[in-house]
Structures are given as C-alpha cells and as structure tokens.
C-alpha cells in the first residue's frame, strides 16, 4: 500500500513536471509556427493540445498531493505511535528528570512540525528539484548561451540560502526549546493550580510566563525574519536574470543570429521565470524544513533514550520473601541516600519503616519496584535477585497504595479494575466492599459508572484512597507497599482505611510506611531509618524499651514525617 502510494507520487511528479515543461515548449513553437504566419486553424488546434497537456498536469498535481497527504499522515501516525510506545518503556528515572510539559511538547508540537514538513515540503522538494532539471535541459536545447546567462544568478541564490539557513537553524532550535519550556509552565500551572492560588503566585507566574512568551516571540521573529529575507532576495535576483535573457536574446536576434527566433526567446523567458519558481519554493521550504529538523532532533532524542530492559526471567507465583542485602544507593553519584541497608521480610509478614522525612523510606520502595536499581548489594525475592527477574511480572506481583493516589479520568469501575482488566463486575464490587468503599460508590446516581474527572477531583482524598485500596485488593499482589497511605486523612475515614488496609495486608508481605503509630504497632518488625541507615529494629515493645530514637518518635505521639 505504502509502496504503491510512493510509486504513484513519483510517477505523478515526473509526469507533472514534464507536462509543465512541455506546455511551455508548445507555446514557443506556436509563436513561430502559427502566430508569426497567421495560421488561425493551426492556432486553434494548438490550443486544444495545450489544454490537454495542462489537464494532465492538473490531474497529476492532484494525485501527488492526494497521495502524499495519505503517506505523510500514515508516517506521522507511526511516529506518534512509536514515541508513545517508547514512553511506556522509559524508566521512572527518566520521567523524574524531565519536566512533564516539556516532554509533552515533544509529542505534540515537535511531531506536528515534522508532520507539516512531510505533508508539503518533501514532495515539493522533489518536484521542485525535478522541474529545475527538466527546465534546464529544455533551455539548453534551445540556447546554451542564454541558459548560462540565466544560470549566472543561481550560485548567488544558493549562497544566500545557505547563509540564511545556517543562521536561522539555531533560532529554530531555540524556538522549539522555548516552546517546550512554555508548555512545561502551562502544564505545571494547570496541575498545580491550587498551590498557585493559595500562595497567591498568579502574578509571578503570569510574569514568568510573559517573559518566556516574550522570549518565544523574539526568537520566533528572528527565525522567521531571517528566512523571510530569502524570498524577496531570490525574487530580485531572478528578475535580474529575466532582464538579462530578454536583453541579450533580443540583441542576438537584432544582430542577425539565425538559430534564435521570437518563439525561442519567449520560451527562454518563460523558462527562466519557471526556473525561479522552484528555486524560490526550495528556498521557502527551508523555513518549514528547519523547524521540522529541529523538531525531529527533539523527537529522536526521546526515541534514542535507552528503555528499561525487559529481558529477565518471568516469575509466576511468588511466596513473598523479600531480602535487602547490604543495599547502597544514590539517585546520583554525589549523594548516597541508602547506606548498607539489610532487611529480611518473611512471606506474609508486615515490615514497618519509620523515620524522619528524607530518611530514605520511599527510596527503599523505589528500589523494590525497580524504579531504580541498587548501586551495591542486592535485593532478593524468594531468593532471586530482582535484577534477574522480568520487570513486568515483578511489578505485577507488587501492589502499591501511595499518599497521592492517582486515579484516571474514567469510571470508578475502570479505575478499580486498572490492575486486572479481566476482572468481572462482581469482583470489582467485592473488592470495593472489602475496601469499605462500596456504600459510598453506590450512593452516586451512576454508581460504579461515575466518571472521575481529572484524577478524582470531585471526591474526597479519603475516598480516593479507598478506591485505590480496592484497586490493590483486586490486583491481589503478593507483596504490598503502603507509602503514607493514611496520611492527610481525617480520623473517621482513617478507621475505614485502616480496616481496609488490614484486609488488604492479610497473607501478603507488606511494607508499611506510616506516620501514625497505630498502623505500625502490630508490625512483625519495625525498622527505624535515619539518614539512609537502619538505626533500630525489632517489634514495637522491644525497640520502645530501648528508649532510643523510636522511643522519642513515639512519645512525640506521632512518628513525625
Ligand atoms: N528522584 C530523586 N532524585 C534525587 N534525589 C532524590 C529523589 N527522590 C528522593 N531523593 C532524595 O533522597 C533522599 C531520601 O528521600 P525519600 O526516600 O523520598 O525519603 P522519605 O520517603 O524517607 O521521606 C532525600 O534526601 C531526597 O531528597
Ligand atoms: Mg517518602
């Protein structure tokens, strides 16, 4: 299909260009053969002929546009698909290190620019190149001397185009970059609008935005201004060429040159005009190609990013023994966040992680899920180093309930079903019942089909939390991670959540990071983490009686976080 379309485009471009050149040739012939000798019949026949040639030209021009539109849209669909596909395989490390709006800009604006270029520029480039060649051949046949004169202007045109392209390229690249930053600002402002409003930052944000916007304007003008010089400059050059051909051609005839005729001179004039059109077009194409190239570079940067390898051995059913052996890790080379951490969790046990903010609790979770990999030491599940396991199946066996639940803009049912798309409606409801959220869902007029807008903006934090617990219950992982799952929740809802969590933890190896002690008192082992190290461990009574770090945290009533 694509090959056929390409073939049609190429054939159309060739026929189209040839018919344009031939049509002009006919005009010159008509001047000499019919007009100069007053042959009206011949002229009429010639008009039909010319109409036929130009019809062919119109038809092929339509064909080439039509099929290049089909092809370019197909190609851009593929690029979008590959890019989105790529995103799915990238590591959390990558997403953590890039502003999201900037990344989104690559998938939207940059792809659009490539699309524009594919859509018009490339076929036009071929067609322009071909018409230049064919026109030149026709001109050479008529008069090599006049052709050379017409061509005198071409090198200067090429030089101008080159200089301008070189300078405008960096402005186009800057333009795409600033556009990405602008989009990052927009995305952050929309997602963080509550924070923006509460802290009264609207003014400052608008000011910052205005600065970036202004930056974009000035870079945009520079980029486009430079390329806008090309057109008038080329046009003037071409007019000079036109005048030279007319002047010298006319002069040659007047001085008795017999190989030239009025028809031939008029052909040369039309050709030299026609020659300027594709040259101008190619010059103009530079601006759209430049921004497409800038976009393509940004798109390929993402494409070339190394994905998380997915080549480990798959695990089907895991019992849930988790061991950290002398794990050392830092997000970057400068700072170690975890130092020589050793943890052993028996299947079905509950391990609590407590400690001040920034101690490294969430980091432990990030390593277990392989969002990041350890620098030294190893993490084992059922005795297998997790680096030897397939990431997908590893994560399928892990369940997470976080402080910031993420719900998607779809129905409650689909949100609960997220981790197990094949679950039946009954199973979804059963999970919701276990999570103490069924009654609340049933109160909505649309029940489970209620659409959550914007990550669940319309319902309370506690209710969102319960839905995410139902989601974890349904997915039924062997290992469970609760990172601050009960933070920011009122005491009544907390009881509900507490119950739901206990239900969820039944029979699973659970890592609980909590800042309310009631959640962790019953844990099999409590690990007190400070500054990336485990400083105390044991059950509640044992480490409480040590009267150390944990004792102080406990008597501060809460494990502060
Ligand atoms: N993506 C990241 N990149 C760089 N440093 C990070 C990242 N996430 C956390 N850190 C740093 O690692 C340390 C431990 O963080 P974290 O494990 O989130 O602490 P906790 O969950 O105990 O509050 C902190 O100093 C934090 O600044
Ligand atoms: Mg944390």
Image (cartoon, rainbow, N blue to C red):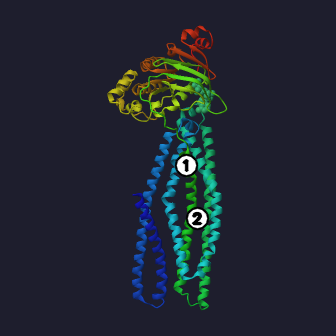
Q: Residues within 10 Å of mark 2 (few under 14, many from 20)?
A: many
| Quarter placement of the N terminus | bottom left
Q: Is residue 149 above or below residue 518?
A: below
Identify the residue shown where x is 62% and y is 14%: 549
Which of label 2 and label 1 is nearer to you? 1
Foreground residue, 383 or 94? Answer: 383
Q: Is residue 426 left or right of residue 264?
A: left
The residue sitting at the right extreme is 334
Q: Is residue 351 left or right of residue 207?
A: left
Q: Could you say where residue 2 lies in the image, as x and y percent from the top left?
A: 42, 58
Circle 1 residue: 300
Q: Secondary structure at mark 2?
A: helix
- Which quadrant of the structure image shows residue 407? top left
Circle 2 residue: 283
Q: Could you say where residue 351 lies in the image, as x and y percent from the top left?
A: 51, 18
Quadrant containing ligand 1 reads top right
């Amino acid at each position: 299909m694509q090959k056929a379309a390409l073939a049609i485009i190429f054939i159309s471009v060739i026929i189209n260009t040839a018919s344009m050149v031939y049509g002009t040739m006919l005009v010159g012939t008509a001047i000499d053969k019919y007009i100069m000798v007053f042959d009206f019949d011949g002229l009429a026949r010639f008009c039909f002929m010319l109409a036929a040639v130009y019809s062919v030209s119109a038809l092929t021009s339509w064909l080439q546009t039509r099929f290049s539109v089909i092809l370019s849209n197909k190609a851009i669909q593929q690029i979008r698909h590959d890019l989105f596909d790529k995103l799915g395989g990238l590591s959390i490390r990558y997403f953590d290190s890039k502003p999201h709006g900037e990344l989104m800009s690559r998938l939207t604006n940059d792809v659009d620019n490539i699309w524009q270029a594919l859509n018009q520029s490339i076929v036009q480039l071929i067609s322009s190149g071909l018409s230049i060649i064919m026109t030149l051949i026709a001109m050479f046949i008529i008069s090599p001397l006049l052709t050379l004169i017409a061509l005198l202007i071409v090198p200067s045109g090429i030089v101008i185009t080159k200089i301008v392209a070189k300078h405008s390229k960096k402005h186009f690249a800057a333009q795409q970059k600033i556009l990405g930053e602008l989009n990052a600002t927009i995305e952050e402002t929309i997602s963080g609008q509550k924070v923006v409003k509460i802290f009264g930052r609207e003014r400052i944000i608008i000011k910052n935005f205005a600065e970036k916007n202004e930056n974009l304007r000035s870079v945009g003008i520079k980029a486009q201004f430079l390329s806008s010089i090309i057109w008038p400059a080329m046009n003037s050059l071409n007019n000079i060429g036109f005048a030279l051909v007319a002047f010298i051609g006319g002069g040659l005839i007047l001085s008795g040159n017999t190989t030239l005729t009025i028809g031939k001179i008029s052909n040369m004039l039309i050709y030299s005009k026609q020659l300027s059109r594709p040259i101008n077009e190619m010059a103009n194409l530079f601006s759209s190609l430049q921004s497409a190239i800038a976009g393509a570079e940004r798109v390929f940067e993402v494409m070339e990013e190394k994905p998380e390898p997915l080549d480990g051995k798959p695990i089907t059913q895991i019992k849930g023994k988790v061991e950290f052996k002398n794990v050392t890790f830092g997000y970057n080379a400068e700072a170690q966040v975890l130092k020589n951490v050793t943890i052993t969790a028996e299947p079905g046990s509950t391990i609590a992680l407590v400690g001040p903010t920034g101690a490294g609790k969430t980091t432990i979770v990030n390593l277990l899920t392989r969002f990041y990999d350890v620098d030294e030491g190893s993490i084992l599940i059922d005795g297998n180093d997790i680096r030897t396991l397939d990431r997908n199946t590893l994560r399928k066996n892990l369940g997470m309930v976080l402080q910031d639940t993420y719900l998607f803009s779809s129905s409650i049912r689909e949100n609960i079903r997220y981790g197990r798309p094949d679950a039946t409606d009954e199973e979804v409801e059963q999970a919701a019942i276990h999570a103490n959220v069924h009654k609340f869902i049933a109160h909505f007029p649309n029940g489970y089909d209620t659409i959550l807008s914007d990550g669940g903006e319309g319902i309370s934090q506690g209710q969102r939390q319960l839905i995410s617990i139902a989601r974890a219950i349904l997915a039924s992982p062997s290992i469970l991670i609760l990172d601050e799952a009960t933070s920011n929740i009122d005491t009544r809802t907390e009881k509900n959540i507490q119950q739901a969590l206990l239900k969820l933890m039944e029979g699973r190896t659970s890592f609980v990071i909590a800042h309310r002690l009631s959640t962790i008192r019953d844990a099999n082992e409590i690990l007190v983490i400070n500054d990336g190290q485990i400083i105390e461990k044991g059950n509640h009574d044992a480490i409480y009686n040590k009267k150390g770090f944990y004792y102080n945290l406990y008597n501060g009533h809460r494990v502060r976080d």
